[in-house]
Image (cartoon, rainbow, N blue to C red):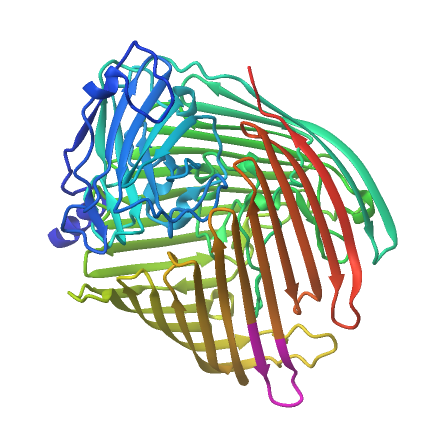
Amino acid sequence: MNKIFIFTFLIITSFGSAQSKKVYVKYISEAITLDGDLNELSWKQAKAATDFWNYFPYDSVLAKQQPEIKMLHDANNLYIGMKVNSPSNNYIVPSLRRDFSAGGNDNITLMFDTFNDATNAFLFGINPEGIKREMLLSGGGNRGSDFDMAWDTKWKAKTVKHEDYYISEWIIPFASFKYREGETKWRFNSYHFDTQGNETNTWINIPRNQQIFNLAFMGDMVFEKPLGKSKSPISIIPYVNSLVGKDYENDNETSDFKFGADAKLTIGNSLNLDLTINPDFSQVEVDQQVVNLTRFEVNLPERRQFFIENSDLFNDFGNSRDSNPFFSRRIGIAKDLDDNNIENEIIAGVRLSGKLNNNLRVGVLNMQTNEDIANEIASTNNALVTLQQKVFSRSNISFMFINKQATKDYDFIEEGENYNRVVGIDYRLASKDNTWNGKYYFHKSFTDGVEGNDISAGASTEYRSRDYIIRLSGLWIGDNFNSDLGFIRRTDILKIDPQIRHNFWPKNKKLQRHNISITPSFIWRPELNFENSDYTIRTAWEGSFQNTSNFELEMFNNFIRLYEEFDPTNKDEAIALPIGDYKYTNFKLQYRSDRRKVFSYSFTPTFGKFFNGELYGFSTRLNYRIQPFFNSSVQINYNHIELPNPYPKADIWLIGPRFEVTFNRSLFWTTFIQYSSQRDNFGLNARLQWRFAPLSDLFIVYNDNYFTNNVFAPRVRSINLKLNYWLSI
């Protein structure tokens, strides 16, 4: 009993060795000229944050090229002055577009945990050409998916290149942050990508088995004077959008003119209020299509700006793969009479999110969608209320209530389908040094006319050391559990999917690290006397090399019991595979080359058995750049499915060239072409963006889609002209 108590105590509480590293933020009264020179007296008097540690390829030595970061502040702004050293001025800067990804190019990023909660942070970054990026980080920075790169805010920067270093000077208004009035300290870290030296460096020493942006590993920035109340402006973002197009399949011509607006307000220093009326998301880039050879729906990431800030408060419930009760892309999309996804117009929405105090966060979302009588789509109110309480050092407990309800009675709504509600509680474990992580949740749905067996629950505990990652996890989804605003892959399952991984850190001039892992995943059907319906045992070896390339070998042992006939080729009039049991093994190899090169690529062949037949295929991605003005990539995915007679054979292609031209820092052109034989579609999306003022844009977007299976013929064509202006009052 004592051993059980001690083990439970270690999991729930937070242990770890804190790193006491500080940078002092000097208070100033003199004006700072943004010129990338740092010649004011205040800069000369400020002490620099330096002594960066190597993170890649090693984590036990100091960085060869040491950045120097100085900070100043007054009542309204945070001033950053940096000298970033490098072997030469031969930098890698693939693009002049804002919000670039950090990997594969030279840049430095600063992270600010303004509430000192090790859970959320604001990130600002710059490259040697002075191109900015900003984003939000949630969930403690445990996963790459914890980033929200669509977040935007206004700030200024000036960067000047020299022979073997660059100077970058920033002015970030305190209105860009959320923080507690009277605060004297924020947690802080910085990471630096040095492509010439082939190093990635961090101010705080972070073990290589942790993410470089993990918020468990941060120092402090100490303000000379307490921070006052932020004078946050009211931002109003009106838009106008005109569209002309034609639906060739139904021989309909369309033309439309829309207008609407978003508004952003700050309540106190720490709450955001977002409002939208008649929102339009036509400027959002088209989704990247995927090949789906499974029986289940796939989810695609949210790209719409309105849903981004503090999105973890709304989206991070349950299990993201199998049982996510709130998936924001459900709002604004509905099914037509032929069960196709179509746009469902959003009339208006309101969103309140942020901190009530240092440990309690709140999220409220309410959106009203329009009716579409022709497609028997009801007008609905979509609401979500969440509360998140921090416990211990980095863990939190969250509560949520979701409600989707038709706003009036419709003849086409069957009795018992008027509403759907979900309530739930989640506990996220994160120890102080991130050795222990976990997620535990219990959700119950309430659907009109449905009672019983409507629970979704799960538990996951992960131990992460330098050499081992061990995870115990599983979930239960009742047969009647339902969330109309969620992503529920399937119901009536009991699933366990533990993992064990062993890391090796060789002292090798070429191989930086490698690991072996095994991840068994078993699913049973409770309503069928816990019959085993599926299992996949994934065994893998992965190696990362000193030149940043990567190699992976995977083996999958599969078992699937089909309860309904299924055609994985999705071909018309094909004979589907019959109900029954299928066991098969297949393999996947993957190689990704050095992304620092002008030409880089990845190549992934797959081969082996597939149901009662065979599957051979490959996917590749080719990238070529002429920096910083031109970037191109081609994604090719091919699968050959060979099933025995009388079942179908198929060659499934997905080809997606993409071209980006950055004429300058304000004018961008992107063309994305996608051909999918599985969807019988050839699509072209071309977008010209002119950023004529800070965060204000003119978009011209051309969309063209064609049938491809029997005859190459036009399907849908449209052109949009959209103008939005960010007005700060």
Residue 531 on the magenta segment: no
Would residue 214 be visible to someone looking at this image? Answer: no
Say which quarter of the image contains residue 40.
Answer: top left
Q: Residue furthest front?
A: 163
In front of the other: 295 or 614:
614
Q: How many marks?
A: 0
Q: In the image, 38: left or right of 667?
A: left
Q: Residue furthest top?
A: 29
Image position of 377 with respect to 49: above or below? below
Q: In the image, 480: left or right of 65?
A: right
Would residue 24 be visible to someone looking at this image? Answer: yes
Image x and y of residue 428, in percent: 33, 44
Q: In the image, 472: left or right of 641?
A: left
Image x and y of residue 300, in percent: 55, 53
Image position of 319 with respect to 399: above or below? below
Q: In the image, 362: left or right of 90?
A: right
Image position of 318 with respect to 358: above or below? below
Image x and y of residue 369, in percent: 69, 37
| Residue at horizontal 67 percent and vertical 31 percent from the top | 723
Magenta stretch in the rendered image: 638-651
Say which quarter of the image contains residue 84.
Answer: top left
Q: Residue furthest right?
A: 251
Image x and y of residue 368, in percent: 66, 33
Q: Quadrant of the C terminus?
A: top right
In front of the other: 178 or 34:
34
Residue 645 on the magenta segment: yes
Image position of 664 with respect to 458: above or below? above
| Residue at horizontal 48 percent and vertical 55 percent from the top | 625
Q: Residue furthest left?
A: 2
In front of the other: 655 or 648:
655
